[in-house]
Each structure stands twice: as C-alpha cells, then as structure tokens.
C-alpha cells in the first residue's frame, strides 16, 4: 500500500471538540473526525463527499494544521506533518495549499487582487520586485484572469474571478498539493463549469494532487479519480470514482446518489428516501452511525452495537457496512 | 387553460446611489391551476425580485413598478392594492416560503405559536382550535410527534424541519398559489429530496399552484410542469419542462444545460458559458445575453429580441427564431 507514488498518508486521524460545559454540566465531546485513514497518490484527485456536519471540512483543515488534530498521524512525502513547528511548518505550507468555498470571505477586501497574489511570493522569498510582478502576471494568465484586473479590489470582481484569484494565490508558491474546499459551490452554473475545467487542466499541467471537498455528487463525478464518502466523522466507503458511482456498496452512498437531482425530466428517479436527519455528533450511537436512518433490509442488532470496519470488497474499494456484499 | 395568476409586463426598478437598477424588466407569464411553474436563473437574473414583486413585497422607494406592470389575481391587480386588501391576499391567496427558514421564523416564539398567529390573523378561530389545527398542519408536512414539536423553538429544529414548519405556515390559510424561493438550496441533498417530494405531494393534496424559483436544473426537472428561464432581468425562454430540456431554443438555455455536470453519466468534458453574469446596474444593450452568445447575429447587439413561438406553449426571445415564425 505504501508505494513510492504515495504523497499523503492519513492514519487514524481524530479531531474532537468540547462543547459547552459549565459549573454543573460536564462538557460534551463532539467527534468531528473519527478515526479516518486515507492515502493519496501523486497527481490524483480524491474527492471527500458528505453532507454538512460530516467532518469533511475539518479533515481538510487538519491536514494543513489550520486545525490541530486530537490524535493520529499525517505523513506528507515522508514528513511527519503533525510534528512540524514554527518556521518548518511555515516552509512546509508552501507545498500544501488550500482554496476556500467563499471567495469573498477569503480575500482581504482592502487589498488589491494583484498584490494579494504577490504577497505569498514575498512571504516565502520566492520572488521580489519586478520578478514578483512578472510571476503574478504569469499566474493571472494561467488561471484565466485579464491582466487589467491586477489593481482591482475583490468587490469589483465577479464570484468566478475571485475564485480564480484564490487559486492563483494558492498556486503562487508552487505547491504539490491542494485542498479544494467546495471551490465551485458558490458559483453560478455557467461559471462553475469554467472553473472545473480550469482545475482539471491545472492538475494535468502542474502534476498537482487534489483533495477535493464537496457535497455535490455531480460535480465530484466530473473531477474525481477516487471518492471517499464521509458520514458523521467516519469514512463509510471509498474507492475508484467510477465504481462508487456505478455500483455503490454502502447504503448511505446509495441513498446519497439516488437523492442527487438529475437535470432531465424524462429520467425516472429510483430514489431511496432517508428518514429523518443526521444524529447529533455529541451523542453518537454506539454501533454504525448510519443505523438510525439506514434503509437496508438486513439491518440488525449488530448494526446498533458494533462499529463496522472498512473492508476491501473489491480491489481498492472499501466499505464499512456489516451487510455489504 | 385559465390562469390563476397572470404577470404582465412586470418591471421592478430600484433607485440607488449607483443609478437605476433594472432588476426585472418586462416579464410576463401565467400560472395555471394546480400547475408548477419553475423559474430558473443565475444570481442577479431577477428571479427573486420577480417573486417578491408578485406579493408587492418591494419597498417603494427605492423600488418602483413600471406603469404598465400588472399582477392579476382574482380579478385584481395586486400591485394596485394596499392595506387590508393586500393583507388578505398575502398568506391567504398567495403564500411564500424562502431559502433560509431560520431567518424567516421568530426565534423567541415556538413554531406552533407562529402557525397559530397566522391562522388567527386570517380566520375567526378560537385559540384552542387554532392550536389543534397547527398540530394537524405540522403532521401534514411530515413532522413526527407534531404535538410535542409544536412547542419547540426554531433553534431546536434542523434546517429541513424548519422548512417544513415554513410550509405548514404557508399552507395554513390554504393559498391558491405558493411561491417557493429556493426552498431547498440551503439543505443537504437527502433533505432537499424530502422537501421536493413533500411539495409535490401537497400540491396534489391541496390542488394549489406553485411558483418554484431555483438555480438548480436538477431540482427543477423533478418538480416543474412548465419552466421560465430568466437572464438579465428578462424571461428568455418558456415552455413545458420536457421541451425546455429536450429542445432548448435559446442559446442561454442550451449553454446552461451543457454546463451542468450529471451524476448519472460517465463524465464528458463540460462546456462553460464564457464571460460572467452581467449586473443589473449595467445590462448590455440589445439582447442581454449577446456578449456571451456563441450564435450572436449583428442585430443582437442593439435590438431587443421579440418573443417568437417555437411550438405550442414554447417561446423564446431570440432573433435566431425570427425566420422560423
């Protein structure tokens, strides 16, 4: 499993938060990420999908140490990421960058977008002066931004243009790895397609590795080589994208896929309706977290008592369900 | 078809510091009995302002309706109504639900009380009868244990449940028309599917008409009988849902359909629409889509296209169809 081609390994990663607590009440523990293990190969695009509260964003932030994991290991290209401190951590961040969902929230509203892309070049002493300016123009060109936008403020740009700025800023330090946290969810359909195509061409050209965090399964199918499905902090299924889409093994993945709306009124939906809402992450059920909503006909006492392990049912396709076959 | 609601030449303009913003500019459509009309468009296309205008929920000033604008409902022009007459139509004749249910409910009142309040505002009803009816309504919209839930405050309910409460309030006075403005956009995909199913079931049960506003072509395909596509404050195409998806006539509609990724097919390269969505303060001249249109003719830059008939009930505002009519 640990081949030379592996760029990132996540082992038994856990992130818990304490909620409330007070004079007469014990704080409750929220398991945002609950024992997640994953491996990413160089140049691939792995999509992390799940509904709100599944822990996908927290996991992405743990990898960059924007959130400190509670326990577990993250190894990036041979480096123990969780052991890094101070300057070494800062230098490491050159190799791993993140692009956020809301492009307006992640750019400084009082900084022109050209200098915003140039700033990381200077922070990391990659280029200065005219060389930095030339590098920024090259980046603008690469992400499809008109050079005339250099001196504009974020509020003067459209959502798609701002997301391109966010991307240029992330790429400026020449990373190997990008965490893309819902990068197209805030964009209009017509613009979303442009940005997805751009992401795909950048990955090929620069040999980037993507962790693509998304809730939109149609978008994910467009861009992912492999897919990992999260539910309440755990990965319930992972495997090659085409297998996940054509023959999902976990009942949650099946339900999620069947609920995704299809832009064609002639397609009869064969929808599996899930009852109820996500359970609260503060009092997780003892067995399979999905058991309370699971429509599987063979659901039994084991589901409610024992957490299912991820089992390899097909080469590289893992499912955490007691009744998957 | 005898329309329940007719919108004629609706223009809603706003006087702002940046000049006149023509958010909606000459929109006409009908809604038939027990019909679901889907209005689809990207951000800034004018779809939400259209919805708000139908209920005259536009502050004047800064808003202003065009002199010929009419919203005909039960033999009256809603835009001319004031005071008690307008209040009777809002809620009892035409009801509305919004994208953010949490923002539309009062956080310090129980959800049951908020339904009771609506019931008693429009009907002569005792407090206890109204409570009984409120619990029935919560049950109708699929909230289990409705009696107990009616005493909950909004923060105790999930987003999906809150949207069900909003639907219960909207149904409380048995409106003829329900306007739903992006009611599923803030919800997770499995919950979104539940709400769409609920609306479809309620429409059949109560025989009401629905105006469903969305940017999501997948959700639209599932719920709409007829579709109006908006761009730049105008309707560019309208017709039966099957025709719009199978034989779109306007280049914008064609472009949108090519730009949406599909969850049910192996990915093909997406084709985005070049350029960005224009802003209402600076619409392009002529056809407002012309700067992004691949099939642009010379006249499109300065002549506003008329409405051309494509087929029964199917029309497009595009010069390409002039010769065929």
Image (cartoon, coloured by chain):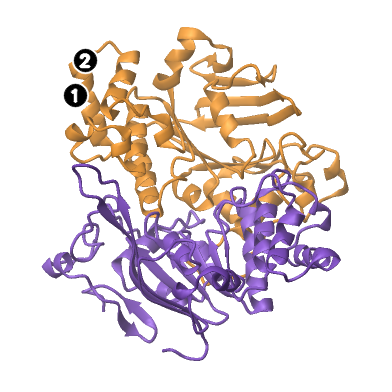
Q: In the picture shown, does residue B178 fall above or below A237?
A: above
- Chain letter of mark 1 equals B
- On the image, numbered disc 1 is attached to which residue? B132
Residue at the bottom extreme of this rendering: A4
Q: Is residue B323 left or right of residue B47?
A: right
Q: Name the spot of residue A58 as percent of width and height, x first.
A: 43, 61
Mark closer to the chain start, 2 or 1: 2
- On the image, numbered disc 2 is attached to which residue? B127
* Colour chain A is painted in: purple
Helix, strand or loop under label 2: helix
Q: Name the spot of residue B119 as percent of width and height, x first.
A: 30, 19
Which chain is orange in the rendering? B
In this view, the residue in front, A63 or A226, is A63
Q: In the picture shown, does residue B258 fall above or below B87?
A: below
Q: Is residue B185 left or right of residue B286?
A: left
Helix, strand or loop under label 1: helix
């Amino acid at each position: 499993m640990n081949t030379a081609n592996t760029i990132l390994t996540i082992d038994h990663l856990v992130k818990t938060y304490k909620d409330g607590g007070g004079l007469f009440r014990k704080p409750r523990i929220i398991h945002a990420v609950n024992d997640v293990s994953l491996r990413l190969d160089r140049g691939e695009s792995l999509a992390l999908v799940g509904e709100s509260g599944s822990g996908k964003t927290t996991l992405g932030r743990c990898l960059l140490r924007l959130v400190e994991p509670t326990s577990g290991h993250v190894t990036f290209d041979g480096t123990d990421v969780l052991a890094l401190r101070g300057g070494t951590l800062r230098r490491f961040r050159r190799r791993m960058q993140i692009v956020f969902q809301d492009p307006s929230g992640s750019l400084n509203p009082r900084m022109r977008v050209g200098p915003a892309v140039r700033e990381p070049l200077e922070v990391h002493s990659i280029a200065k002066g005219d060389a930095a300016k030339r590098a920024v123009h090259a980046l603008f060109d690469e992400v499809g931004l008109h050079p005339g936008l250099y001196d504009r403020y974020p509020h003067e740009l459209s959502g798609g243009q701002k997301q391109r700025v966010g991307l240029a800023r992330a790429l400026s330090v020449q990373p190997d790895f990008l965490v893309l946290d819902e990068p197209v969810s805030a964009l209009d359909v017509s613009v979303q397609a442009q940005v997805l195509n751009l992401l795909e061409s950048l990955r090929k050209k620069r040999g980037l590795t993507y962790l693509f965090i998304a809730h939109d399964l149609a978008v994910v199918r467009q861009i992912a080589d492999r897919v990992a499905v999260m539910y309440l902090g755990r990965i319930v299924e992972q495997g090659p994208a085409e297998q996940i889409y054509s023959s999902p093994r976990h009942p949650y993945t099946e339900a999620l896929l069947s609920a995704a709306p299809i832009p064609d009124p002639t397609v009869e939906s064969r929808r599996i309706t899930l009852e109820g809402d996500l359970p609260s992450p503060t009092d997780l059920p003892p067995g399979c977290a999905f058991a309370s909503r699971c429509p599987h006909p063979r659901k039994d006492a084991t589901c409610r008592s024992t957490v299912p392990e991820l089992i390899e049912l097909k080469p590289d396709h893992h499912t955490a369900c007691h009744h998957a076959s | 078809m005898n329309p329940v609601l007719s919108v004629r030449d609706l223009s809603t303009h706003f006087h702002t510091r940046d000049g006149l913003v023509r958010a909606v500019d000459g929109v006409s459509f009908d809604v038939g009995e027990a019909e679901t009309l889907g209005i689809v468009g990207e951000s800034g296309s004018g779809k939400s302002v259209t919805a708000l205008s139908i209920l005259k929920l536009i502050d004047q000033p800064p808003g202003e309706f065009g002199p010929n604008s009419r919203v005909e409902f039960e033999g009256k022009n809603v835009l001319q109504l004031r005071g008690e007459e307008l209040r009777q139509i809002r809620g009892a004749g035409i009801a509305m639900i919004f994208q953010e249910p949490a923002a539309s409910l009062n956080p310090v009142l129980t959800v049951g009380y908020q339904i009771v309040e609506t019931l008693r505002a429009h009907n002569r009803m005792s407090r206890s009868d109204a409570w009984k009816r409120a619990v029935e309504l919560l049950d109708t919209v699929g909230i289990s244990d409705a009696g107990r839930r009616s005493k909950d405050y909004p923060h105790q309910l999930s987003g999906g449940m809150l949207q069900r409460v909003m639907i219960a309030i909207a149904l409380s006075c048995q409106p003829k028309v329900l306007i739903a403005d992006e009611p599923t956009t803030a919800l997770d995909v499995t919950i979104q599917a539940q709400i769409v199913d609920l609306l479809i079931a309620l429409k059949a049960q109560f025989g009401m008409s629905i105006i469903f506003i969305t940017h999501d072509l997948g959700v639209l395909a599932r719920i709409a009988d007829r579709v109006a596509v908006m761009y730049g404050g105008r309707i560019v195409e309208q017709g039966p849902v099957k025709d719009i998806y199978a034989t779109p006539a306007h280049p914008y509609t064609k472009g949108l359909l090519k730009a949406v990724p599909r969850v049910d097919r192996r990915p093909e390269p997406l084709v985005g629409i070049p350029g960005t969505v224009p802003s209402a303060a600076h619409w392009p001249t002529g056809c407002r889509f012309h700067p992004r249109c691949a099939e642009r003719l010379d006249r499109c830059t300065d002549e506003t296209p008329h409405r051309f008939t494509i087929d029964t009930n199917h029309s497009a505002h595009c010069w390409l169809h002039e010769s065929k009519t």
